[in-house]
Amino acid sequence: MTGIDEIGMKYFLEIPQKEIEEIRDTIKATSIKVTAENIERMKKTTPNRPETMTYFDGISDFFGQREHEIRVAKEEGKKVIGYMCMFAPIELILAADAIPVQVNSGWFDATKLGDRIVPVEVCPIIRSTIGAKMVGLSPYLELSDTIINTLTCDGMTKLGEILSDHKPIWTMCPPRVKDSPQSMVLWREELKTVKQKIEDLTGNKITEKEFRSAIELRQRATKAFRRLQDIRKGSPVIMGRDAMLVNQTSAWDDIKRWTQKTEELCDELEKRIQQKMWAYPPDTPRVMITGTPMVWPDNWKLPNLIEESNPQGVLVADELCSSDRLLYDPVGVDEWTMDDMFNAVAERYLLTSTCPCFTSKDGNEDRINWLLNRLKEFRVDGVIYHVVRGCMLYAMEYTRIKRILDHRNVPVYYLDTEYTREDVGQMKTRVEAFIEMLKAKVEI
Amino acid sequence: MMGIIAEMLQAIIAVGIVIAGILATIVGVKDRTKKISCLRVFVQTISLSIIFLGLIIGPFGLTKYPPIGNAPRDMLIGTSILGAPFPDGLSVPTMACYYPSGRTMTCVLWQIQSYIFPFWDAGKGWGVNYVSSGLERLAITFGLLMVMSIVLGRFFCGWICPFGFYMDLITRVRKIMKVRHRNLSERLNEGLRQLRYLIIAAILLLSFIFGAEAIVGIHLVSGTEYKGFIYQYFSAPFCQICPMRPLCVPIEGALGWMNLNYVFSQTTGQFYEIGYYVTSLNVLVLILVTIGAFVLRRFWCRFCPLGGLIAVFNRFVPFKWASVVRLYKEEEKCTKCGICKRVCTPQVTEVYEEKGGDVTTSGCILCFRCVEMCPYEDCLKINVAGKTVFKSKNWLNLSK
């Protein structure tokens, strides 16, 4: 009998090289087409789209400029550290002069490959990421030297295990309760371990100076991000999809350049505010999305539908860990000692998170507060609760969120979907009905 | 005459340099996470000079080396309050100390203790004459304490108290040395906070026991009689272990406003090896607290009986309803990021843990560091009589 180790790969199937290449090329071609199509649609909705968006359009291409840059940097000896979830301590990666890059997959077609390994009931983000790995589709995943996997939901927990057939995986286990005294202890230890691993991999010791400049780099990114959010709060100069794309590209772009470009975008938008050059009529119903993250490029269905629907809606804010949550919270350092910086980073990642994988005696109240605050600040007319099939944690929190939003007279609509293009027509009807309802309310 | 003018000029120039320097830092500070802190250092410096040197460097030009009883405080301040003779100066709940010559105000704790014993009855005090009874003087002291506690609360601790300033300076030294600070466990910290009330009770009880003869006519402890050992050297028991006394007396002496030769020449036995104002217990406590403050931020404030007294008159019902300076938190804007908890020097956890509303607590020294560091616009607010004075801002806007 063979022992566990002798079987070799734990999950992955042997697929002939030719088939792999065929599938990869097909999906890649579709992906490039979909990316171009999405951008085209965004341009069509706003004929006077900000010019700086051209940069973000370029960087949103997975098989373009950024892939090339990372490849070159890697050849020059830099390490690439991929991450699944926004719990990965990016400041530490930056401080060790490595490249952080998010590797989650948004490709619809890759889910079918993933179905060969995990059942269809599993969250499509997980299945798609597995599928992408099976055929080596995602350039960022392929270029990563290692992947930081945070065990947040069930899907993420097993995803790391499955991918470990091909990649070194560093797991980080966030405690499910944030505010007990022992949870911070656990989380700090997890972070310490990862820090050590990053240092070993890159061969760079994380010094106080490097760490500080990495934190300040990310603080500047947060500053730019918040500036864009403030603009969205006020005048209708940018479509929600554009802002969402800007936010999402920060997960793989060079953060310094991203900050600079976002500031440029804000400058441009501020000029437009003075010229009163609106991107959409000011009385457009303002929609907020919450729920499962939406990963570029394929899962862009809902934003497209909202902003192209008739009557038109606009996406003013969201509570997605693929967008607004990425950069909202800064690392606040009291004393610039290694110890305090480290604690600040640890707290920033654990305590500010509104992920439904957490619970407390008051439930996941941080998420509710986040939503309520945005309802007020962004003058939201209605909330769409986006859940992909298999995303249990978000689905289970819906009842409570609905009760609270009902209490505040904010319409909320539960929209469940899949990684598929087939339900777009049906979704369109549902979204348009919801926005029409909001519109009627706005007109009253 | 010329001497006085020269001294005044000297003093004005000295203070001017300090003020100009600090003002320059305030204007120059672009970093929003440092603005309130810098303002606080400024206020602390000014308070320090006013508290200890106010009467000497001010326009009064009073004599150097005044004999006991003729200290400037006794000449100018507090000779009467509301018609009642009150010769020991304005009672202010800071570690302002009774002993140095130039100080303009008096530590409340010294007054509370010494009016019970040994100066319950009207008559001769340390160089002054008390016309009114101890009870009357105590009523005035507590009245002043109550008013000041309700109005400013522990703002005294964060912004005015010279000993708090001393500990802040130690923290600054530690930061320059790049040494990390430690935290006490929340339970121990809470225990220390309760210890304050125990210390207050012990002080009152001890003073009462010593003064029992004058108050209820029973002689309890030997040495409490006139010119006895306790009468002479162990009145005001807390002052014998207070860490502030060995700090301010030598500093004022070194600046030339007290005759140190005289102070230190009079060593009178037990505890008083260092001089008649400073006991060896004082020095020991000061050393311990200094080490403590190097390791833990605002170490003394966690169990300071004066802070406890302010807390009683500020955070306890019914005074709580009338307190003027309050810290508010808006629940919806709070993301529970933990910054307020981490930056808090006396390790107050309520600001983080409470859901929202009035989050002022008895342990809070109102230094406003949490308000300054909170990165969410309008989440934390300092309200003075209902008006917002400081509020948290998106401090990223101005950092480089």
Image (cartoon, helix red, strand yellow):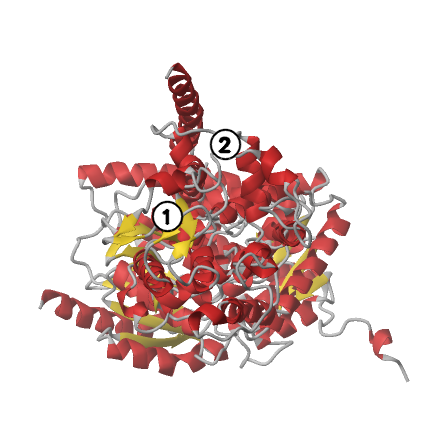
Q: Residue furthest top?
A: B2
Chain that bears disc 2? B
For numbered disc 1, what is the local secondary structure?
loop
In the rendered structure, which amino acid carries the disc numbered 1? Answer: Gly
Residue shown at 24% from the left, 39% from the top: A272
In the rendering, at what x and y percent does residue A211 appear? Answer: 62, 44
Residue B354 visible in the shown view: yes
User: Is the residue marked by circle 1 packed among few (<14), some (14-19), or many (20+) residues within 10 Å?
Assistant: many
Q: Are marks 2 and 1 in contact (CB under 8 Å)?
A: no
Instruction: Return the residue at label 2.
Output: B65
| Of residues B355 and B214, the one drawn nearer to the viewer in this rendering | B214
Instruction: Return the residue at label 1.
Output: B89
In the rendering, at what x and y percent does residue B150 appear? Answer: 31, 61
Question: Which of pointers 2 and 1 lies earlier in the amino acid sequence?
Answer: 2
Above-or-below relation of A82 to A11? above
Q: Residue furthest bottom?
A: A1
Whole-angstrom CA distance, mark 2 to mark 1, is 19 Å
| Of residues A267 and A218, the one drawn nearer to the viewer in this rendering | A218
| Of residues A243 and A263, the one drawn nearer to the viewer in this rendering | A263
Q: Within the image, what quadrant is residue A98 found in?
A: top right
Residue shown at 50% from the left, 77% from the top: A359
In the rendered structure, which amino acid carries the disc numbered 2? Answer: Tyr
Chain that bears disc 1? B
Residue shown at 25% from the left, 79% from the top: A407
Q: Are marks 2 and 1 on the same chain?
A: yes
| Of residues A284 and B225, the one drawn nearer to the viewer in this rendering | B225
